[in-house]
Image: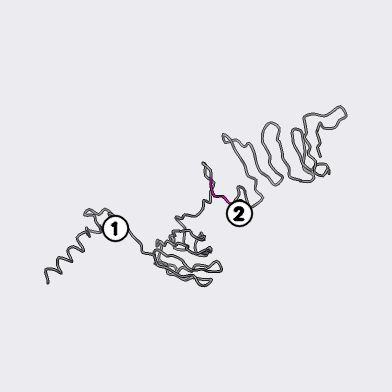
Amino acid sequence: MRKSINLCAFLMFSSLFIEAQYIGINNSDPQAALDINGAVRIRPLTFDVTSGTLVITGNEGFVVLTGTPTIDAALDVTAPVTGVKIIIRNATLRTCLFPEGNKDIPAGKVCEYLFDGALWQCIGSNLLQTGWNLDGNSGTDTMTQFIGTKDDNVVKFKVDNSEKMRLTQEGLKIINDNTIEFGYGIENKPYGNGRIFYNNFFQTHSLDIYGGGQAFDGYDRRITMW
């Protein structure tokens, strides 16, 4: 009986190697504090969302949110030590709010968070892209997503590090020898040669195109359509 116990213990720990300050699993030559040769599984813990607030501890590892909440529930994750990670999968049909983190979790999405000592920071997710990629984006929502600013600053477009176009509160401006401006119904808009205006000179729904110089009668050369 004693031999059987010893044999079982040997088989159980035969793949665990300890060398100085390093621990190796399926690895006889560990090179880090924990050196694992193979896959690591984190078993999920399921939480049923039944109210507006869900309290979970920060050392759960992998959390799956289930249930049929009627409102967007808020996560209250107890603050652990700095450096702890948690993976949260939202399997409900509502957005899961995370006031203590830097990103909420939409329905059907997964986020991985790292506690930096003050906040939970999202370090990985399968959320929709929040940036505009050089090779284009897919799945954009024109109701909520846009290119631009939320303040009164202009948006500049450059080619070869030289500004060629900008979006302003007055409309689109194309920068070249003669600036072309496309106004959007702005009253009393400044005008000049080589520009296109809409709703200028108190003419409702009119389009004015200005050329260079002046006509024989002293007025600017322009074409007005309305």
Q: Which residue is mark 1?
A: 34
Residue 143 in magenta stretch: yes
Which circle marks residue 164 in the picture? none
Q: Quadrant of the C terminus?
A: top right
Q: Please identify, in this view, whether the residue under mark 1 or under mark 2 is nearer the observer.
A: 2
Q: What residue lies at 19% left-to-right and 60% top-to-bottom?
A: 14
Q: Is residue 176 left or right of residue 213?
A: left
Give the dominant element type of the magenta stretch: helix, strand or loop.
Answer: loop
Residue toward you, 4 or 188: 4
Q: Earlier in the sequence, mark 1 or mark 2?
A: 1
The three-letter code of the residue at mark 1 reads Leu
Which residues are drawn in magenta?
A: 137-144
Q: Secondary structure at mark 1?
A: strand
Residue toward you, 218 or 222: 222
Residue 50: x and y, percent? 50, 72
Q: Secondary structure at mark 2?
A: loop
Vertical relation: 97 (above or below) 131: below
Residue 116: x and y, percent? 44, 60
Q: Which residue is mark 2?
A: 144
